[in-house]
Amino acid sequence: MEFHLNIFTLNCWGIPVVSKNRTERYEAIAKYLQESSHTIVCLQEVWSEKDYLYLKDSLKSNLPYSHYFYSGVLGSGLCIFSKWIMQDVFFHQWPLNGYIHKIHHGDWFGGKGVGLCRIKYGNRLINVYCTHLHAEYHEDDIYLAHRMLQAYSTAEFVNLTTGPADISILAGDLNAGPGDLSFKIVTQLPPLVDPFAEDPTKPKPFGTCDCANNSYSDPNQVKICPEGKRIDHILYKLNPAWEAEVIKFGNPLPDRVPGKDFSYSDHNAVSLELLVKPLDNKYVEKEVNIGDTFDDTATQAIKVCGEAMTNLSKSKTLYLTVGGLILMFLIGTVGYWPNSIIYDVIKLFITGLCFYYLIMGSLWHRIEMNSLKAGLTALENFCRTRIESKIATD
């Protein structure tokens, strides 16, 4: 029998103390979801457990099942709400999550990854994945390799776990739009359908971040591109026995919280309504050959990994050189420091700086290098097996 799915995703921008109008916005988000017809809700950047518990209590009548993915120091910020029973839950944390010393970015402290809730609706199984990839932060995008490998890890996780499900949904802030390498990896490897491309009535343009209609958007970015960037997505993959019709797709929230002069978040929400229907019993199951579309993408990803490893080796040399020079300075000046609290504080600061550079050039370097190698070898293995498979079939 056919069934409806109504999915909603939003990056809530819920950083305690830092995020503006946080309490009022969460109240508005809860009110909207209470009155909506959404059956599955995926939220990101719910960094406070109290905010999650508030939403859980507020939505217990219409979305009684929920799960928060605890991880890292702050929690992953990811949670899923459902109208139907969550049969299984699992969280896969990525090995590369930014840098511990980039405190103002905070991604490392969140222990980010991808969360899976397997939802049971009657005799149907629905895999719901919620995720939030690393942001760019800078124009030079020093996190490109991190985000790319997060995308690859997510894509492989989805690809390996969709088997039992009738339909699989991936929702969240990918910090990547169509055409970006990370987006290609996520949509080509499982593979996943982008409903924006399937919906003939879709609004154009359709952005979700730094849009002119959002009160929190960066004015400088709005001047450059008023429609913003489409980096928040709901993607899906069907079991071969099913087909889906996009009923409605877009941003369901008004530009401002009713009665207020601010938006629900610094991102726009995305919603997708699907009608999932069984194919004729005589359908012929076809094997999806992901290699034909993923070969070029994998080659690009391998190149990014290689460049990142080269840059990381240069950083190691720099960190160890600076750390070594500071250490030599500390050893060479033993006994020459005046006996004063001020100088003791200065020595303590320099010693801490020395340890920072030595740790970044040794322990942290090994952690990041091994994570890059893990992604690189997996990508190389994919390309190698594709070539061997083609040779075997020729």
Image: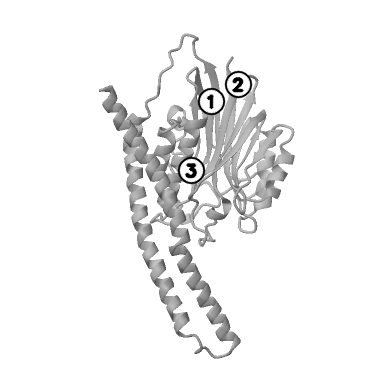
Of callouts 3 and 1, the N-terminal one: 1
Judging depth in this view, the residue of 41 and 164 nearest the camera is: 164
What residue sits right under mark 3 in the picture?
A: 174
Quadrant hosting residue 285: top left
Q: Secondary structure at mark 2?
A: strand
Q: Which mark is residue 319?
A: none
Mark 3 and mark 1: Cα distance apart in space: 20 Å
Where in the figure is residue 80, as x and y percent of width and height?
62, 37
Q: Secondary structure at mark 3?
A: loop
Mark 1 and mark 2: Cα distance apart in space: 9 Å
Which amino acid, by three-letter code, is at mark 1?
Ile
Q: Is residue 185 visible?
A: yes
Vertical comparison of 255 with 387: above or below:
below
Q: Is residue 223 visible?
A: no
Say few, some or many: other residues with alpha carbon within 10 Å of mark 1 (under 14 / 14 to 19 / 20 or more).
many
Q: Tell me which residue sits at (49%, 24%) in the image.
A: 238
Vertical comparison of 348 with 193: above or below:
below
Q: Secondary structure at mark 1?
A: strand
Where in the figure is residue 244, as x and y percent of width and height?
50, 22
Mark 3 and mark 2: Cα distance apart in space: 27 Å
What residue sits right under mark 1 in the picture?
A: 167
Say few, some or many: other residues with alpha carbon within 10 Å of mark 3 (under 14 / 14 to 19 / 20 or more).
many
Of callouts 1 and 2, the N-terminal one: 2
Q: Tell me which residue sits at (51%, 61%) in the image.
A: 102
Where in the figure is residue 263, as x and y percent of width and height?
59, 47
Which amino acid, by three-letter code, is at mark 2?
Arg
- Quadrant of the drawing holding the C terminus: top left
- Quadrant of the drawing holding the N terminus: top right
Q: Which mark is residue 124?
A: 2
Judging depth in this view, the residue of 246 and 391 nearest the camera is: 391
Q: How many marks?
A: 3
